[in-house]
Image (cartoon, rainbow, N blue to C red):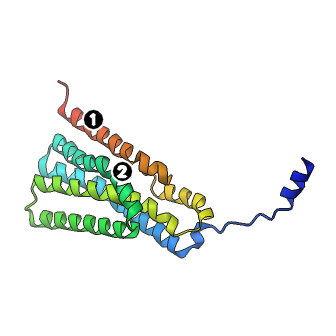
Amino acid sequence: MAAATVSTANVLITAVEHPLRSPNYRLWLIGGTISLLGDQFYLVALPWLVLQQTGSAVVMGAIMMAGAIPRALLMLMGGAVSDRMSARKIMIATAMARTICVTVIAVLVWLRVLRTWELYALAVAFGVADAFAVPAQTAYMPSLLKREQLVAADRHHCWSSSSRVCDQDAGRRMGLLRGCDQLLVYHWRIVEAAGPT
């Protein structure tokens, strides 16, 4: 027993370089945080726009649920695709798709020709993009860092994306639950908007 204690005392513990010292990781973290901020603006702006256009809380809840359904149904597939394809290319493609959708909606609002079905299409497109973007972001992080830096990096990733599951494997398994809890919230909003029966 004493020999084991002595041998462990002689082992030199090497310090793990902090993930924020990696410039690629810093850029990825900053970009992800900015993207998350944009997503939060979208989550506020879309219901506001729907209420402004339709005046109906039921339509608002239905449109938000239209975005949650593809997210819930496709999140696991998004994780599987991220494992087999370049996570970086998936992140770029989904960011471009969301940018195009928001730009089209902005132009339609500016021209005053926006219709309700286009808001449904935007919500579905965002839901599909999120279903692939979220797992891709989680799958991309290990390519930026050394294995021993991942634990510390997960803490930063959790902080910058608090609404997302941070453990890679659990994120893929639990992705469906994230979509399902959003479905329940949107369903509750629709039921609440309908009023007492």
Q: Would you identify the image quadrant in which residue 11 lies?
A: bottom right
Q: Would you identify the image quadrant in which residue 41 lies?
A: bottom left
Nearer to me, 68 or 42: 68
Which residue is identified by label 2? 76
Q: Secondary structure at mark 2?
A: helix
Q: Would you identify the image quadrant in which residue 111 lies?
A: bottom left
- Image height check: is 114 above or below 69? below
Which residue is identified by label 1? 188
- Location of the C terminus by quadrant is top left
Q: Secondary structure at mark 1?
A: helix
State the residue at coordinates (53%, 75%). 23
* Tag 1: amino acid: Trp
Query: Where does the image place residue 20, in percent across and percent down from the top left?
Result: 57, 69
State the residue at coordinates (49%, 64%). 141
Q: Residue pushed farthest top?
A: 197
Q: Which mark is residue 153?
A: none
State the residue at coordinates (31%, 37%). 184
State left or right for residue 133 relative to residue 117. Answer: right
Nearer to me, 36 or 94: 94
Q: Residue pushed farthest bottom?
A: 23
Query: Where does the image place residue 82, in percent across and percent down from the top left?
Result: 39, 61
State left or right for residue 123 relative to residue 164. Answer: left
Q: Residue pushed farthest left?
A: 113
Sequence-earlier tag: 2 or 1: 2
Assess disc 2: are there few (<14), some (14-19) or many (≥20) residues with their C-alpha within 10 Å of its C-alpha: many
Q: Nearer the viewer, mark 2 or mark 1?
A: 2
Q: Residue pushed farthest right?
A: 2
Q: Mark 2 to mark 1: distance in Å?
A: 24 Å
Whether residue 115 is visible to the viewer of this picture, yes or no, is yes
